[in-house]
Image (cartoon, grey):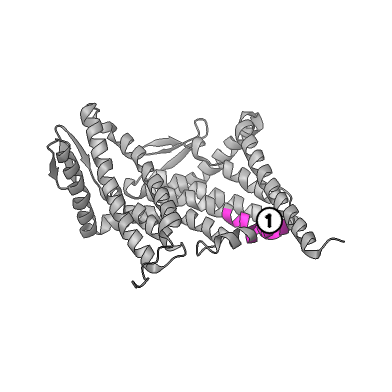
Amino acid sequence: MKKLSDIKKNSLSKNYAFSFLALGLILLLYLCARDFIPSFNFYKEIVEFYAVAVGKSIEIMASFSGTLVAYNSQSFSIVTSEHSFNIISHLAIKFYIIAFLILYLFPRKLLKTTLYFLFAVLALFVISVSRYSIDINNNPEYKDFFLILIYASRYLILYILLSYKIKLHQAADNLIIKINSILKDKIHLSFLNLMLFFILLRPALSFIDAFVANQNLFLAEKFTKMILWYATGILKLSGYSVIVTGSQIELGNYWVYLGPPCLGLGVMTSFAVLISIIKSQTINKLIYTLIGWQIIIMLNAVRVVAILLHIYLNQIPQQLIEDYHNMSNNYFYIVVLIMIVIYVRWFQNINFRKKAI
């Protein structure tokens, strides 16, 4: 006869296999839906119908507030007194497809599941209307932050659906328990809480960059001086003579302006938060966070130098600098990831409180 432990082990193995199979099927179906469904006429008709629903809703809402907004169903454009924009490319239909796949692949409790799907449909529709309301107001100071908040809200809806789905299936629940048992010795968060953490992290960082840095002029000034001081030193060591005027560093007829969102405060905060959720001694976290912040500040200075030298040596028109600025943002996330790996691999378990004999 088989031992009870062996039976349980085989049962758990089957549950994990089932969970991975379900996840694989969801991914496969989504990829097929993304690549093939848009080529069918019925999909185009659905998108156009949805665009009309969103556009007309915006038009009606604007009329209540006294704003002159019209929806052109021929060009699928929102037209205001100042500008117009097409809404087809930002309808985010894929979130409806993902929501459907999450809930109706191996469905359970159909009535409750359908209510969850209707909630997702309504919430995603409201989010779409809100997303274009931001374009109508066209406030560049806050637009980027609110757009990131909109994107995070969509993923938050999927998170709610996924949490509900996991509770319906014992196999998926067992898999999450297994993952949590692995994570509990490493970080302070469970798997689902970790997902929620990353969903909300980007809006929080955007808030820091868009509002905190802008409002706290003293903080922004100090970080700007520090970064430009490093950048000036690197350029002087390289044989270039530069001029620093306020938040701007100039080389010949070319310059880089360091505004509050460019100071890296959001990245520094994310680094500190990520270190804080890892299980280790407080002194290890404090020392490594301070070291990491200095590295990020230095790398920000290197970024400024690289952009300035690139446009100076290649005589790139100043109006194109934004492209290089946006591309260079990505390398900070890679650097933070590398520093987190270094912390977990080598720094996490150093005992700074060990007394010398």
Vertical order, 1 against 232 (above or below): below
Q: Nearer the viewer, residue 189 or 250?
A: 189
Q: Is residue 282 above or below residue 76?
A: below
Span colored in magenta: 159-177
Whether residue 21 appears in magenta in the rendering, the answer is no
Q: Does dot 1 land on a helix, a strand or a loop?
A: helix
**In this view of the protein, can residue 82 be seen by the observer?**
no
For the point 87% across and 61% down, which residue is it? Answer: 1
Q: Nearer the viewer, residue 257 or 94?
A: 257
Residue drawn at x 14%, y 35% is 239
Q: Is residue 99 left or right of residue 144?
A: right
Q: Residue at x 68, y 43 (%)?
A: 25
- Quadrant location, the C terminus: bottom left
Residue 206 at x, y percent in the picture:
38, 52
Q: Quadrant of residue 98?
A: top right
313, 134: nearer the viewer: 313
- The type of residue carrying mark 1 is Ala
Residue of label 1: 172
Please rate how many residues cluster around mark 1, counting C-alpha atoms within 10 Å: few if below 14, some from 14 to 19, many from 20. Answer: many
Q: Magenta includes 168?
A: yes
Is 69 on the left or on the right of 289, as rendered? Answer: right
Q: Residue 336: x percent and y percent? A: 39, 50
Lateral position of residue 356 relative to residue 89, left or right: left
For residue 40, what is the image quadrant?
A: top right
Residue 91 % position (x, y): 52, 41
Q: What residue do we see at 17% from left, 44% from top? A: 233
Residue farthest to the right?
1
